[in-house]
Amino acid sequence: MAITACSNIGFPGVYRINVEQGNIITQEMIDQLKPGMNQRQVRFILGTPLTEDSFNQARWDYLFLIRNGNDTIEEERLTVFFDGDKLSYFTGTYLPSSEAALRQAAAAERAAEEED
């Protein structure tokens, strides 16, 4: 019990390294995404998703964390949605640049119209 209690306190002088986990996502990667891309093309740009729900093949989640001990220094998220095999839209920390944003908004609007 004493060891468990000390684990949250931390020891003076002990250096904790930054730990990176997940997929590194950059603005350049986001700008390459275009509605209508197939899943293979998206996987080539972004890499393998951190979580891929076996019950919902239309959603991929990418997460990137930098932690120092129990403290989260940086957290970035990206969720990619597909309609069949084609990229429909994505949401998350990064937004597409201006031209890419227009394409993304148009695709999201079309997807919303098709659902109604």
Image (spheres, helix red, strand yellow):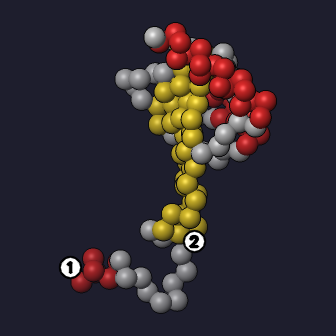
In the rendered view of the protein, which quadrant contains the N terminus? bottom left
| Residue 55 appears in the rendering | yes
- State the image coordinates of residue 112 (x, y, percent, origin top left): 52, 17
Q: Secondary structure at mark 2?
A: loop
- State the image coordinates of residue 68 (x, y, percent, origin top left): 53, 69
Residue lying at 59% horizontally and 14% vertically, measured from the top left? 110
Which residue is nearer to you in this view: 14 or 74?
74
In whole angstroms, how far apart are the C-alphas of marks 1 and 2?
26 Å
> In the picture, residue 94 is in which quadrant?
top right
The residue that disc 2 covers is 17
Q: Which mark is residue 1?
A: 1
Residue occupying the far left of the picture: 1
Residue lying at 67% horizontally and 39% vertically, measured from the top left? 95
- State the image coordinates of residue 3 (x, y, percent, origin top left): 28, 81
Judge left or right: residue 9 versus residue 104. left
Residue lying at 66% horizontally and 15% vertically, measured from the top left? 36
